[in-house]
Amino acid sequence: MARVLNFSAGPAQLPLAVLERAAKEMTDYGNTGTSVMEMSHRSKAFEGILHKSKDDLRKLMAIPENYDILYMQGGASTQFAAVPLNLLGDKTAADYADTGAWSDKAIKEAKKYCDVNVVASSKAEIYNHIPDLDKSKFNPEAAYFHFTCNNTIYGTKWTNLPEVGNVPLITDMSSSILSEPVDVSKYGVIYAGAQKNIGPAGLVIVIIRKDLLELSKEKAKKMTPTMLRYDICAENDSMYNTPPTYSIYIAGLVFEYLLGLGGLDEMKKRNVAKADLLYGFLDNSKMFKATVRPQDRSLMNVPFITGNEELDDKCVKAATAAGMINLKGHRSVGGLRASIYNAIDLDGVKTLVNFLEKFEKENA
């Protein structure tokens, strides 16, 4: 069967070149006579995979030397607890922005460990925009400011970083990491689940400034599970226990692949072109409508609707039959959604737009 176009929000489509290389190395990686999945994480072969992948990620994102890269487990959702447990220190409160389902879950988790000050929310408007920030609502004694920079379900994106002064800026970058360049030095912590733009589910990457690692070492909450301690993960080179070895291997292949394409400047050009094409069609369609105001639209996740649930379902079924899967919107909002991560190229988006144009003509 021919490969389909997978518009899933995650686990998402991976670059075909990466999958083909992984297939070639499946039973014998680097003349070791074994698969990476069977390989000891303490072996020289796997240590080479681990360190090269971190070096390539550092190059790809221009991560400064005063930041460490941690490979952790449990997905980004585990970081909802890890962040306050590691970073509160002697403080008792943190600032959060509520812009979608995942930020809402992060807030609920953080409330178990500290006082949460929600500085802004777009929940009342079904998260269809990024809310304006009123600095007077910030807590000057906050341990950190947390936000989700790209909202997978609702298709919104922060285009301007919150100005938080000396308060560490913490972000969940799961659905936009590697889609465009970011200034890592603006953040205290960036964390991201791998299953969208990086690799298989199960791995979470944490990019953390070293002074916050020291804070974790000195003042992490006593209740913090060992597996959630940033300092312990760093001290053990992300191998306190057996890490998700194959996920790390695939992530490393993706980093190498993206560097070969020209890095994140090139990915931004491609992703802007893809998003412009799809949003351009939606804005001129008489049947389909994008749900997010233009200034807050995500490059990665594009939700849209017809306004008729039966027609939405018909479109999803027709798309699946045409070789385009997972266009159904998240169960909490319905409608349709195309997640156009790095591995979906411009031709893939053209195929989608051509399908939607045809569907509109046939169902007008």
Image (cartoon, rainbow, N blue to C red):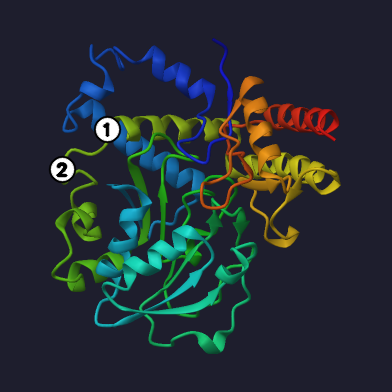
Where is residue 11, by image quadrant?
Answer: top left
Residue 198, horizontal then vertical, whole percent: 45, 38
Residue 25 relative to residue 20: left or right = left
**Element class at badge 1:** helix
Q: Is residue 338 above or below residue 63?
A: above
Q: Secondary structure at mark 2?
A: loop
Please tell me whether residue 115 is drawn above or below residue 261 in the rendered image.
Answer: below
Q: Which label was assigned to residue 245?
A: 1
Q: Is residue 312 left or right of residue 233?
A: right
Outermost residue to the front: 310
Residue ID at (72%, 49%): 307
Asked whether, in this view, residue 282 is left or right of residue 331, the answer is right
What residue would you read off at disc 2?
Answer: 241
Viewer-closest of 138 and 99: 99
**Is 238 or 76 nearer to us in this picture?**
76
Residue 230 appears in the picture as rendered: yes
Relative vertical location of residue 103 with respect to residue 55 in this rendering, above or below: below
Disc 2 residue type? Asn
Query: What is the C-alpha distance between the residues marked 1 and 2?
Result: 11 Å
Q: Amino acid at mark 1?
A: Thr
Residue at 73%, 26% in the rendered image: 351
